[in-house]
Amino acid sequence: MKRREFMRDLERGGVAAVLASFGGATGCRKAGKSAAASGATAGTAAAGAPASEAKSGITPRTLLKATRDPHIEVDLGAIGRNLERVRARTNVPVMGVVKANAYGHGLVEVGRFLESAGVAALMTGKLDEAVRLREAGVRCPIANFGPFGPADAEEILRRGVRQVVATDGDLAALDAAAAKAGVAAGIDIHVDTGMNRAGVPAGEALPLIESAASLPRIRIEGISTALTEDPEFDREQLRVFVEVCEAAKARGIDCGPRHAASSGALFGADDVFLDMVRPGIALYGYYPNARTMREDSLGLEPALRLTATITFVRDVEPGESLSYLRAVRIDRPTRVATVGIGYSDGYPPMLGGKGVVLVDGRAFPVLLAVTSNHVMIDLGDDRTVRVGDEVVLVENRRGSEAAADSLAVASGGSDYKFLIGLNPLLPRTYREGPIRSASTSG
């Protein structure tokens, strides 16, 4: 098909029209096969559908449904309730962390929602994330904790992003761009108090703060540090960080809100909350470690549900095997189902032989056969599971065997890594009411 024809069909009839233009209604239809035999008649097309859709039987709705396997559902209402729990616990403003595609929940949609919920700011881990949020119309303060280069400075200013800085070079790049644009550059100074990962070392922080304060085009809008989540060492980190902030204050420098507490610090002493907190995983309904998960002190609600469908069901006899390299050897009559999801979608291979999925509320073990596009499950002697049945791979109900944190415990993995690893291309549906959850199990 020529590009001009492709664009014409796309404009007139959407994707279905393009598909229909290949070899008649569908490129795979045998010559001479009637529309009635193929099930594609004008009577089966959606009301008001273009003629090409009437020929093919393909509508935008059916195409959309076909692409939604696997599929993620996100309960924004749960995120909002988790936010309110964090606010009640800390009594300070919240910087909502949306890095890593909002922990797999969807950067733009979650960012928009948190803005509407009145967070003080959003935190990103990459400049591209901040840019995407601005392009999506998000207008609340955004602090980019990711790196940047001098060539990025103009865009940072144009997008109105608060950039985290740690060196004189960072300041110089933003100051030069601000002078050129005739605007002020908002910054957050990140102080390294022991992570040794990023930020200005605490012993060198005051000179950097003074340099920033001396530049008329630089506006200090916050100062931060990151805690190691080792409770005893965190106390030392907090002491050092507060000393830096007090030293700046003694020199007449206002560094803006002080913030150090991520989700892990929400469950310790109140003095770590300072002027603002930066919860990430807690907003999405998960606790930062096994102890806080057991205690469930905030009553957090998981917001994400991951589903797929059964694509094959078959009986496998003793002596047969499953998957590559005969990963599973069958020693008893076994009914096996294949689920249309795999590690290319973000389902962790480590759950093979350890995880469970839910079908109609019943738990079935995941076999040691997780491949790029397939997960295989052991149905035992169940004869009711059918092709097309919905499979819940991540449940949004705390305590479920298929909850992300439960799966992390079972596999020795991490719910952080599981959620963040979900393919950003998977279709996501957002709602502010409860998402369906399995009625039994866990």
Image (spheres, helix red, strand yellow):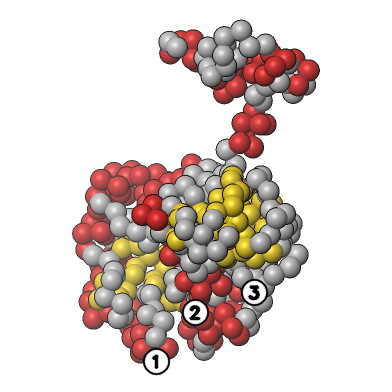
Which of these two is toward me, 245 or 117?
117
Label 1 vs 3, first from the N-terminus: 1
The residue furthest top is: 32
Mark drawn on residue 289: 2
Q: Which amino acid lies under the numbered mark 1 shown in the image of this protein? A: Glu
Mark 2 near mark 3, Cβ–Cβ under 8 Å?
Answer: no
Which of these two is toward me, 383 or 401?
383
Q: Which amino acid lies under the numbered mark 2 shown in the image of this protein? A: Asn
- Structural crowding at the residue carrying mark 3, measured as other residues with C-alpha within 10 Å and reported as few (<14), some (14–19) or many (≥20): some
Q: Is mark 1 on a helix, strand or loop?
A: helix
- Mark count: 3
x then y, percent, for residue 384:
72, 54
Mark 1 near mark 2, Cβ–Cβ under 8 Å?
Answer: no
Is 229 displayed left or right of 199 in the figure?
right
Position above or below: 273 against 336 = below
| Residue under numbered circle 1 | 232
Mark drawn on residue 399: 3
Numbered disc in front, either 1 or 3: 3
Label 1 vs 2, first from the N-terminus: 1
Which residue: 53% across, 17% down? 27
